[in-house]
Amino acid sequence: MKAVVYSLINLAVVLSLPGCTTISTNQYDATALTRYTWQVEYSTDPTKTRSRYEAFATSELLNRNGEKPAGAVTGPDDRGLWWGALPPRPTVDDIEQRQQLDKPDTPQLIKSVTFQISFLQNGQPTTLPTNYDVYRTVVKAKRSNAPLELTLGVGDRSVEKAEPK
């Protein structure tokens, strides 16, 4: 019985949350910002239970609608993304400058991607964050000029789903 009550309460909470707006659009773009960052972990003990991370040089490349951007050095990768040139690796002097009482580890190259969708909402240009799956759906729809139905997330602050119409 308690499970049924909790399920009904959870359903009521979900239904009362703002968001889940659906928008139909013919004008949209998908972007993926690919980023390389050199990062060094500094730890104060050999078990690395207490560490801090320092970011050094970063390079970025903006992918738009899955097309090869100017400045692309590698790609497309297994996810259809293009990557720019590697940033310069931090030197031992760079690493030691940020060293305090802790010991630096070997520099690591971190790859990250930020996905966004731009579209018209009530006649206003809007850009919201999204995920890889939505990005790929929008890229494929753009190639065929298919209209899209976008489902926005909680508070209309992200795009959670895209479906060609």
Image (cartoon, rainbow, N blue to C red):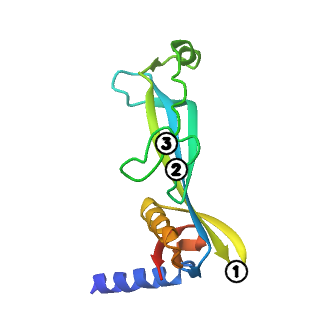
Front residue of this view, candidates 69 and 52: 69
Name the mark on residue 122: 1
Task: Tell me which corner region of the image, top left, top right, bottom left or bottom right, holds residue 61.
Answer: top right
- Residue drawn at x 57%, y 34% is 58
How far from the left and from the top, in percent, is residue 145? 53, 74
Is residue 68 depicted above or below 156 in this figure?
above
How far apart are the alpha carbons under marks 2 and 1?
31 Å
Q: Earlier in the sequence, mark 2 or mark 1?
A: 2
Is residue 14 depicted above or below 115 in this figure?
below
Residue type at numbered disc 2? Lys
- Apparent side of residue 133 relative to residue 123 in the rendered image (left or right): left
Q: Earlier in the sequence, mark 1 or mark 3?
A: 3
The residue to which callout 2 is attached is 68
Secondary structure type for disc 1: loop
How far apart are the alpha carbons under marks 1 and 3?
34 Å
Secondary structure type for disc 2: loop
Is residue 91 depicted above or below 164 in this figure?
above
Secondary structure type for disc 3: loop
- Residue drawn at x 48%, y 44% is 112
Quarter occupied by the N terminus: bottom left
Number of numbered tags placed on the structure image: 3
Name the mark on residue 83: 3
Q: Crowding at label 3, few (<14), some or many (≥20) Cα neighbours within 10 Å?
A: many
Residue type at numbered disc 1? Asn
Instruction: Please say if the residues under marks 1 and 3 sit with CB atoms less than 8 Å apart.
Output: no
Residue type at numbered disc 3? Trp
Q: Crowding at label 1, few (<14), some or many (≥20) Cα neighbours within 10 Å?
A: few
User: Which residue is outermost to the left?
Assistant: 1
Front residue of this view, candidates 97 and 89: 89
